[in-house]
Image: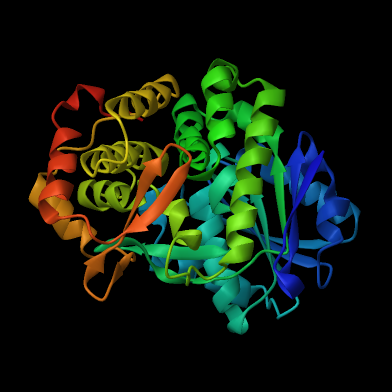
Amino acid sequence: MRRLNVELAARAYPILIGGGLLARADFIANHLASPRVAVVSNTTVAPLYLDALVTGLQKVGVAVTPIILPDGEAHKTWDSLNTIFDALLAARCDRSTTVVALGGGVIGDLAGFAAASYQRGVPFIQIPTTLLSQVDSSVGGKTGINHPRGKNMVGAFWQPKLVLADTDTLKTLPARELSAGLAEVIKYGLIRDLPFLEWLEANMDRLMARDGDALAHAIERSCGNKAEVVAADEFETAKDGGRALLNLGHTFGHAIETGLGYGEWLHGEAVAAGTMMAVELSRRLGWLAAEDVERTRALLRRAGLPVVGAALGVERYLELMSHDKKVLAGRLRLVLLKSLGEAVTWADASRNDIAAAIDTCCHDQRESPPDA
């Protein structure tokens, strides 16, 4: 087992990474305010892992209320949030009840937002079961739901008490989901960790083959990078850089997700295409060479990810991006690359350059994601 810590003073918490951790109910019990939890999962993950988790918790004297939601980004809504609240109220859960998220990023965001809101805040534990959630969304305390006008527009910062990343859950992960997670892994190399980017180039075949040691290393390195950024800028308030740098490709990618309808593209797929737009814009600003663009494109392709954006039309992209959370005082702040391994937030890119980068990366739809 590998262990990292997110250093947030009184709100610090551990990230545990390794195989067979779902069977270690004692790790979870040690972080409970009382011997009672509500486990939020979905119709895909629950049949695979819920029984084992419940059995383990019950053996150590923990009472469990299961809450099962439909699967998919399309269900990251007020209705699903209210389903959680209804179940918590029906079970008479109090402020000492811990909400446990068992699933991918959608479940983690929903369960975390519910925990932040129920009775003005109850404890929360993340048990991420996808690569994307293990390396990104489960760490850092961002929770929320989608709105028809924008992704993750309603939510709260609510840190978990524990993140338990069982790498054995990746054995049942569909190939498309594995690739989606690798988009966030690659992001860390691009924004702040060039040696990790080079390691990914040398080991992408091992990751695609689900080599356990390679996956554990990638998860640990990704979580380590995110933990450092979150500890320095928990609420994304830094005026220059900080936690916002974790959003490389996300403003473009969120436009794809919102424009097509949530769930048509996986989040990681949209981020990959959005990353190419950010890299192309960085080239147009004179920061990256054409070779850097091709190097990024080649790595994303090897990870099974799209490098061409959805055909929404440039004006539709720009409209959707104007609603993004990174807009401050009417100016769109984009995460761009000064060089591979060095990201910056930038609000001075011209509309023409942004439009040209989008157009360049949306010219050929033959590389869109495969059907689910």
Q: Quadrant of residue 87?
A: bottom right
Asked whether residue 97 is in view, the answer is: no
Asked whether residue 54 is in view, the answer is: yes
In this orientation, which residue lies closer to the viewer: 40 or 20? 20
Farthest residue, direction front: 286
User: What count of labels does the image hold?
Assistant: 0
Percent across and percent down for residue 15 are: 73, 51
- Compared to residue 138, the image places residue 311 above or below, namely above
> Going by the image, does 77 lie left or right of 95?
left
In this orientation, which residue lies closer to the viewer: 321 or 244? 244
Percent across and percent down for residue 341 are: 48, 40
The quadrant the C terminus occupies is: top left
The quadrant the N terminus occupies is: top right
Q: Residue at x 60, y 77 (%)?
A: 89
Q: Residue at x 88, y 53 (%)?
A: 26
Q: Residue at x 56, y 67 (%)?
A: 233
> Going by the image, does 259 lie left or right of 88?
left
- Compared to residue 156, the image places residue 243 above or below, namely above
Q: Residue at x 55, y 40 (%)?
A: 193
Percent across and percent down for residue 367 are: 25, 24
Q: Coloring scheme of the render? A: rainbow
> Going by the image, does 157 lie left or right of 346?
right
Q: Quadrant of residue 274?
A: top left
> Going by the image, does 168 lie left or right of 367?
right
Farthest residue, direction right: 60
Percent across and percent down for residue 255 are: 25, 51
